[in-house]
Image (cartoon, grey):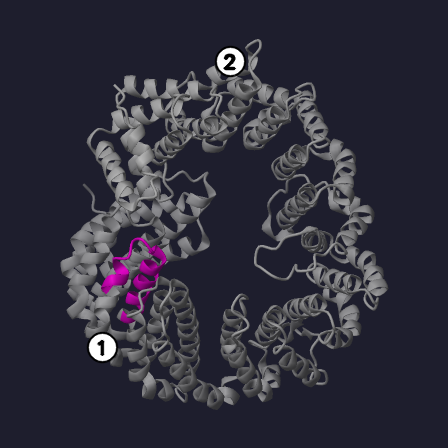
């Protein structure tokens, strides 16, 4: 029996905080005490057209939130709750929801469509609610079905397809859904809202249509309707149709050949003359085709030995027409396009697609793009100069060095002078293009670089000056310096070329990071990331003094952040960002200077002060800082070795906090890694803390609330702890091995057809082997017999993993290492005993 909850739903939206809080409390109490009746009452509210729109809206939101959550553990809990509800009550709720999609109120219909899909996502995979698809299709086929009912039915079908897997429906159901959807898209359907809902539903149902796309007649019909819909008079419907074409390009690439001429015509007309949102999708269609062909070329690699799927070379065939069309889009810039992270327009989409085309066809693009560059690069109109520079930068990745080298060598001087162009957009794109040139055509280690000892002084002078430009340009210049420095890594004698400029570069990067006009840009973080790369890739013999002088500067800056006035959330975020960046710089300096015996004393002398700073940083409770500070502490532990023990009593409470931070699970994962670093540094000096660490790690592995990605590092950490404390690990063997065996069992049952799950399975298996290796090595000299009861299980696990052809190379190496450690530790005892 539904309870009257209208007054509570309205009160929960009251402007009066006290009334609102009381109402929310009453609703929560009802939910906790009688969930089935709570859901029935919400469904009645949503279905009742006489109720106020506000109470119906909140009822819909609460219904949806009772079935779904972003957090995986919470979602799992809600699903289990729904499954346990009495079937009769669930039927009542589902009937009310199906009735609501016929409501006269659009918002109620829309919400009900979403809730039905959430219920379907739980029930259809369990083979429950078999009548759902039939009853929805009935709304479409019934004589005289009103347009609003058709619209919301199609919307519901679309949401259901989005929520479930294509394996959950039988082919007859798929056929019926596609028939209803494609009919809804038809030109004969004269209601625009129905056509739009049908087109969006097709987008979600495309994954289900594999069998239909294999059948030429059905495929022709679907493609005909989508192409006609792409010409609808309403822009929103055209956009939805092009979104379908983008998805078809990636899902059904191999059957597109007969339609490509039509599709080129359609997309070309849209790019040249349609509204921006439609044109963007038309460009995205070609980007999608490029993505497919780039992937197929990787398959084609003779080294991989794979038999490659069919490759139709659509981009190569379309090249003479496609490239001019894309070059034309580059001239459609917006006045303020460099501002804001989410800026996206036709010029940017065209440039991105041009870059993908260059990666797809390589050298063939150069003669098609260079005339455009040469024609526009010196024109008085800034749009022409910017478009020419953008085109040049876009095609740097893809063609061979031989093809690009003469062109870039000839153009480098011009680009360097264009960093002083009067127009902000031109300078911004020039800096980005230089960054791309340094990324792809500056690799002294491999024998080729556009940078020579002769032109380097000019390049450095230009970059150092340009870093003082407006924030959006300065940020791109940082990117150019980053790639320039990175090119000198592992470059032997060539790495010395950058050494004379280090002091100057560091000074300008620090100044860029301090700028106050860069608040809205990413300049500060770009400057610090570049500083890290410059330090990391420098020639240590020549730069050790410079880096040693940088250390106290960064320490002082980090100390100063503690004094920042923090009065708003914004202040707090700014403080956290600066601290995170500075901790990152300290980590790189620690790693660099501790890499040789000559420079390591610099870190040893400053270690106490550095550690005090890190501990103070933990006092600012922001996860972004904790991640960076933890990583830097890991580097310090590695650098100081056994000396690190003196910091443990102060640090330990923060390690505990990190290990218990399930909500910000990345912090938890990094803390686990740092515990491993500390164990490797301290060896048995970690013993006093091991009981608490192991208890927390085991607790974490047993918790369903912890994100699964943290669990593999925990197993690896078992290995680090065991290696550090040797025979003392005896007290943890039973609980640790029990969980490792359980995890090995989980690996055996994982669905290896799911790519994401396969990656996780590989991580988990590798980390279990690492744990075994660490424990076996730790016990090798004494108490090795403790591992005898577990030898059989380890061998079985190795055998199971060896049968999986999809295993990662790193898993194979870890398995072989564990087997070697088993033989080494247990010797002849490894042989299975005869029964």
The residue where tag 2 is placed is 138
Residue 240 x %, y %: 63, 35
Q: How far is the residue under mark 1 from the one under mark 2?
A: 72 Å
Mark 2 neighbour class, 10 Å CA radius: few under 14, some 14 to 19, many 20 or more: some
Residue 202 x %, y %: 59, 29
The dot on residue 612 is none
Left or right: where 123 falls relative to 210: left
Q: Are marks 1 and 2 in contact (CB under 8 Å)?
A: no
Q: Nearer the viewer, residue 54 or 481?
A: 54
The residues colored magenta run: 656-678
Would you identify the image quadrant in which residue 799 lies?
A: top left
Residue 294 x %, y %: 65, 49
Which of the image's four quarters has the C terminus?
top left
Left or right: where 380 falls relative to 630: right
The residue where tag 1 is placed is 645
Front disc: 1 or 2: 2
Question: In the image as oriented, which residue stretches furthest toward the top?
Answer: 143
Tell which circle, 1 or 2, labels the residue nearer the N-terminal end.
2
Residue 317 vs 231, above or below: the answer is below
Does dot 2 land on a helix, a strand or a loop? Answer: helix
Does dot 1 land on a helix, a strand or a loop? Answer: helix
Q: Nearer the viewer, residue 692 or 63?
A: 63
Which of the image's four quarters has the N terminus?
top left
Name the residue: 31% across, 44% down.
16
């Amino acid at each position: 029996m539904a309870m009257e909850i209208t007054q509570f739903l309205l009160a929960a939206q009251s402007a009066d905080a006290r009334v609102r809080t009381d109402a929310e409390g009453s609703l929560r109490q009802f939910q906790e005490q009688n969930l089935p009746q709570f859901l029935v009452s919400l469904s009645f509210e949503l279905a009742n057209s006489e109720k106020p729109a506000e109470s119906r809206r909140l009822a819909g939101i609460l219904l949806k939130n009772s079935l779904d959550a972003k957090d995986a553990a919470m979602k799992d809990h809600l699903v289990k709750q729904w499954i346990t509800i009495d079937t009769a009550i669930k039927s009542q709720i589902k009937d009310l929801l199906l009735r609501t999609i016929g409501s006269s109120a659009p918002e109620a219909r829309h919400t009900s469509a979403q809730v039905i899909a959430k219920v379907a996502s739980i029930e259809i995979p369990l083979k429950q609610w078999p009548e759902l698809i039939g009853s929805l299709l009935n709304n479409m086929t019934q004589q005289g079905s009103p347009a609003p009912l058709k619209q919301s039915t199609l919307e519901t079908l679309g949401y259901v397809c989005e929520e479930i897997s294509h394996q959950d429906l039988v082919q007859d159901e798929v056929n019926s859904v596609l028939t209803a959807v494609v009919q809804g898209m038809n030109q004969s359907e004269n209601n625009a809202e129905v056509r739009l809902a049908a087109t969006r539903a097709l987008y979600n149902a495309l994954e289900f249509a594999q069998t239909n796309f294999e059948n030429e007649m059905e495929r022709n019909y679907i493609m005909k309707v989508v192409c006609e819909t792409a010409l609808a008079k309403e822009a929103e419907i055209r956009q939805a149709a092009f979104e379908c074409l983008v998805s078809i390009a990636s899902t059904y690439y191999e059957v597109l050949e007969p339609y490509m001429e039509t599709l080129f015509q359609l997309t070309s007309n849209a790019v040249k003359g349609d509204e921006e949102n439609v044109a963007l999708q038309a460009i995205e269609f070609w980007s999608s085709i490029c993505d497919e062909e780039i992937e197929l070329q990787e398959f084609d690699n003779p080294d991989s030995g794979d038999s490659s799927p069919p490759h139709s070379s659509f981009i190569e065939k379309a090249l003479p027409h496609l490239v001019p069309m894309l070059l034309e889009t580059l001239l459609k810039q917006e006045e303020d396009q460099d501002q804001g992270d989410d800026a996206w327009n036709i010029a940017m989409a065209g440039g991105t697609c041009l870059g993908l085309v260059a990666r797809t066809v390589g050298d063939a693009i150069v003669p098609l793009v260079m005339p455009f560059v040469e024609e526009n690069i010196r024109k008085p109109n800034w749009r022409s100069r910017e478009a020419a520079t953008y085109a040049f930068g876009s095609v740097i990745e893809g063609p061979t060095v031989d093809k690009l080298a003469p062109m870039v060598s000839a153009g480098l001087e011009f680009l360097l002078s264009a960093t002083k162009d009067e127009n902000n957009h031109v300078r911004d794109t020039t800096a980005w293009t230089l960054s791309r040139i340094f990324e792809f055509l500056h690799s002294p280690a491999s024998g080729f670089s556009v940078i020579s000892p002769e032109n380097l002084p000019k390049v450095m002078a230009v970059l150092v000056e340009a870093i003082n430009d407006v924030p959006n340009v300065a940020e791109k210049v940082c990117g150019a310096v980053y790639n320039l420095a990175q090119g000198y890594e592992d470059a032997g004698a060539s790495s010395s070329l950058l050494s004379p400029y280090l002091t100057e570069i560091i000074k300008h990067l620090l100044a860029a990071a301090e700028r106050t006009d860069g608040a809205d840009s990413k300049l500060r973080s770009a400057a610090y990331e570049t500083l890290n790369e410059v330090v990391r890739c420098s020639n240590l013999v020549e730069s050790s003094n410079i880096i040693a002088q940088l250390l106290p500067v960064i320490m002082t800056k980090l100390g100063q952040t503690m004094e920042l006035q923090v009065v708003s959330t914004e202040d707090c975020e700014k403080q956290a960002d600066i601290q995170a960046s500075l901790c990152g710089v300290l980590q790189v300096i620690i790693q660099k200077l501790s890499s040789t015996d000559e420079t390591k004393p610099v870190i040893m002398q400053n270690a106490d002060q550095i550690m005090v700073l890190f501990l103070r940083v933990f006092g600012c409770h922001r996860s972004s800082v904790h991640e960076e500070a933890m990583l830097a502490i890991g580097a310090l532990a590695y650098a100081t070795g056994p000396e690190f023990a003196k910091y443990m009593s102060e640090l330990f409470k923060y390690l505990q906090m990190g290990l218990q931070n399930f909500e910000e699970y990345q912090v938890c994962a990094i803390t686990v890694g740092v515990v491993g670093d500390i164990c490797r540094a301290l060896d048995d000096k970690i013993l006093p803390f091991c009981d608490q660490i192991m208890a927390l790690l085991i607790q974490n592995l047993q918790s369903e609330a912890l994100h699964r990605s943290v669990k593999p590092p925990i197993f690896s950490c078992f290995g680090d702890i065991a290696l550090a404390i040797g025979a003392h690990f005896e007290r943890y063997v039973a609980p640790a091995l029990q969980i490792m065996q359980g995890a090995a069992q989980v690996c055996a049952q994982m669905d290896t057809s799911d790519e994401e799950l396969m990656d996780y399975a590989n991580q988990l298996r590798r980390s279990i082997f690492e744990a075994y290796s660490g424990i076996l090595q730790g016990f090798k000299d004494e108490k090795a017999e403790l591992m005898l009861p577990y030898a059989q299980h380890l061998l079985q696990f190795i055998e199971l993993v060896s049968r999986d052809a999809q295993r990662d190379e790193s898993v194979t190496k870890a398995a072989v290492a564990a087997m070697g450690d088993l033989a080494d530790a247990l010797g002849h005892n490894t042989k299975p005993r005869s029964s």
